[in-house]
Image (cartoon, grey):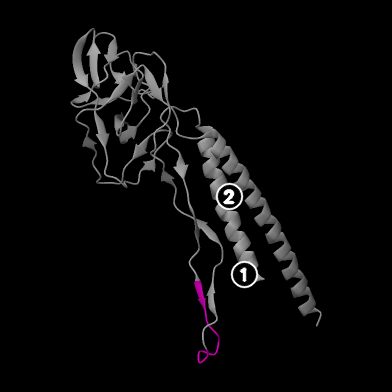
Amino acid sequence: MLRGIATATAQLLAQSKRIDILAANLAEVDTPGYRADRMTEQTFAELLLDRIDRAQSSVGTLEIGPVLSRPTVDLSAGPVEQTNRALDVALTGDGFFVVQAPDGLRYTRRGAFSQDAAGRLVSLEGWPVLGRQGPIAGPGPLKIGPDGQVLADGRPIGRLQIVTFPAGTEFARVGGTYLAPPAGTAGQPVASPSLLPGYLEGSNVDLTTTMTDLIAASRSYEAAQRALVTQDAALSRLISEIDQR
C-alpha cells in the first residue's frame, strides 16, 4: 500500500514537471529562434528487497515510479520565414549569433536585429551583437550580407561572429532564446557561415505534437491523482481497523 502511494506520488511529480516544460514550450511557439526544452522519463533506481532473515534468499527488486531527466535544449532547426527586413537574418547551418548581455556573452539563433541611435547593431533587448572584432556600428543604415558581412552605406564595417560548440554540449537557458554553455566551454568560429538576410528562423516547437503531449501528460497526472486518493483512503481504513482491535 505504501508502495502504491510512493508510485503515485512519483508519477504526480514527473507529470507536473512535464506539464510545466510543455507549457513553457507552447508559450514560445511563435518566438523566432526559440529552442524547445526536452525531458525524458526514466525508471527510478531499483531497490533491492531482502528478507529480514538474511540466511534466506533475497525477495527481488522493486521499482517505485518514474523520474524525469534534467531538461535539455533541443537544438534542431526551426522553419525559416521571409520578413524582408534588412536586419533580420537566419542561419541555415550550425552555429549561434553572439550577443553581449550585461552579465556576459549569450548565444542565440534569433537573428532579429536592429540599429540603435548610436549606429550599433543590437538585439531586441538593445544588447550589442558581436562581430569578429567586437560590437558592430556604422554611420549609416546597416545591411547584412549572406556571408555575415555587415555594410554601412555600402561600405564593409565588420562581419558577424558565428560560433559553434562541440557535439553534446549541454546549454543552460538564460532567458527566452538565449543559451549559455558550461563554464570554460568556448565557441569555435564558423569560417564560412551561410545566412539568409531578410529571413528569420522560427521556433522549433511543433504545435501539434506539443499539444498532444500536454493533453497526455495532463491525463497521466489526473490518473496518478486518483490513484493516490484511492491508496490514501485504503490506508486510512486499514489504520482505523487496527485502532479498533
- Residue at 50 percent of width and 32 percent of height: 28
- Residue 41 lies, with reference to residue 27, above or below; the image says below
Where residue 39 appears, x then y in whole percent?
A: 47, 49
User: Looking at the image, can residue 48 be seen?
Assistant: yes
User: Looking at numbered disc 1 in the image, what kind of residue is underneath it?
Assistant: Arg
Sequence-wise first label, 1 or 2: 1
For the residue labelled by badge 2, is the local secondary structure a helix, a strand or a loop? Answer: helix
Magenta region: which residues?
A: 47-56
Instruction: Estimate how packed mark 1 is, as few (under 14), some (14 to 19) or many (20 or more) residues with alpha carbons within 10 Å.
Output: few
Which quarter of the rendering shows the C terminus? Answer: bottom right
Secondary element under disc 1, as helix, strand or loop, is: helix
Whether residue 119 can be seen here:
no
Which of 225 and 217 lies nearest the eye of the viewer?
217
Callout 2 environment at 10 Å: few (<14), some (14 to 19), or many (20+)?
Answer: some
The residue to which callout 1 is attached is 3
Q: Magenta stretch: dominant SS?
A: loop
Q: Is residue 222 above or below residue 153?
A: below
Q: Within the magenta stretch, is there residue 38?
A: no
Determine whether, in the image, residue 176 is placed left or right of residue 101.
right
Instruction: Report the residue at 54% width, 35% height from top.
Output: 26
Residue that appears at 24% across and 21% down = 147
Left-right relation of 1 to 76: right
Q: Residue furthest right?
A: 244
Per the image, the residue denoted by label 2 is: 16
